[in-house]
Image (cartoon, rainbow, N blue to C red):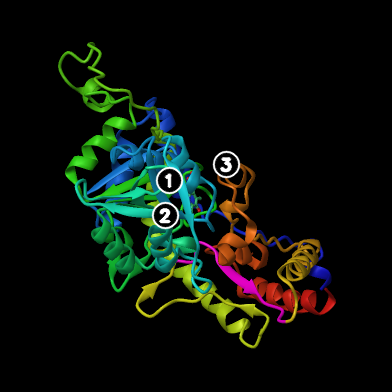
Amino acid sequence: MEEYGKRIIPLTRPYFGQEEYQNVEQVLKSGWVAQGLRVAEFEQLIAAHEESSYAIAVSSCTTALHLALLAHGIGPGMDVIAPSFTFVATANAIEYTGATAVLADIRPNTFNIDPDSIRAIIHKCYHWDQKREILVHNETRNQLKALMPVHQFGLCADMPEIMNLAEKYHLAVIEDAACALGARIEGVHQGKFGNIRCVSFHPRKCITTGEGGMLLTDSEEFGKKLKALRSHCATQSEVSRHTKHMGFLMPEYPEVGYNYRMSDIQAAVGCAQAKKLDDILEKRKKAAKNYDELLTGFGWLKIPVVPEGYHHTYQSYVCMMDFSGLSIEKMNEKRNRIMTFLEERGIQTRQGTHAVHMLGYYKGKYGYKDEDLIHSYRADRLSIALPLYADISLEDQKYVVEMLAEGNRKS
Ligand SMILES: *Cc1c(COP(=O)(O)O)cnc(C)c1O
């Protein structure tokens, strides 16, 4: 193991080639570095890949989620249901608008929002207002306006069930697909089920622009609204302003909007990345399969579950630890000892993500207890993401698995 003494196996690593450098150089030489033609090209590439009619690039997936909510008119006096076991950005975007993030639990095997948990919340806390045909909260009188499922770690949530609920109760659906570019259920892209889906190009995701996000929709109305909102609701884009007659005049700004634009420097990286997306997804899938095989027989480590007909993109390879007979807190201590053992051997791991209902702001504001959403709590305490990136070597994966086994014995 001497050779591994100095070796670092990161949790993830971007997959860049010459094209990214060349594209960025071109943009810098052109002098047009803010949102322009490169952003438009990047939008077209992603829209084509995801079979989406409209694509709107923005500064991050967090800002994408914010705009998706605003486009639905979501604000104070409204509730949006999202899973607890997700990156805090999902819930924060809801809170930005003045609406309330209502947290639901996940299914323990898929890490995705459990439609039964949504149903239970609706039955317990809301009633159907016949006249307005909306769900109203029994105490706060807030309207339940939308569901925000997350396609966690690259696996689609149970969208058929979620869409059934949305139809029944007249709810909007905004998909947090930050981790799920390219994910599908039975050949249908995840976003075809909902209204607006949001993806991320943060370096933790499959392809990256440093920071960046995109909204995808098939609705022309939303497409137009979102384009306006990302750029102060200007009635004219910078590109058309600078290429058309009388471009010296400022456009009209009829409403308050935001500067959530992506730059052409970022999009230049994105265009190169988008062209290798399928190759990257294929490589990640292969690496995930390697782990699946190497980890067979690890009774205490549950590998990611892929339900029939689902296509997992493995933004993260997240396992659950289960040492039967121990309490959650004892198991958590053991997990952390194993993760420390790995870290000392140059292997980076992380918990899958956190349970938002256990975080200070949400706990304090809404009075959650850890056990209220038991599967999210367990996943927070017992999940582990293993190193996975497009060019991880089989040799490195074997080392990770070997050290996992040793870490378990010694912890
Ligand atoms: C990464 C992530 C986000 C935030 O994406 P950014 O582009 O970093 O803003 C939101 N939701 C989920 C589920 C994520 O994993």
Give residue 235's position: percent from left, percent from top.
22, 24
68 over 106 or under it: above or below: above
Q: Which residues are magenta?
A: 313-324
Q: Which amino acid type is shown beneath numbered disc 1?
A: Glu
| SS class, disc 3 | helix
Q: Which amino acid type is shown beneath numbered disc 2?
A: Cys
Badge 3 is on which residue? 365
Q: How many marks?
A: 3
| SS class, disc 2 | helix
Q: Is residue 352 visible?
A: no
- The dot on residue 125 is 2
Residue drawn at 47 percent across, 61 percent down: 152
Q: Quadrant of the N terminus?
A: bottom right
- The dot on residue 139 is 1
Q: Earlier in the sequence, mark 3 or mark 1?
A: 1
- Does the magenta-highlighted stretch encompass residue 319? yes
Residue 111 left/right relative to 97: right
Give residue 402's position: percent from left, percent from top.
73, 78
Q: Earlier in the sequence, mark 3 or mark 2?
A: 2
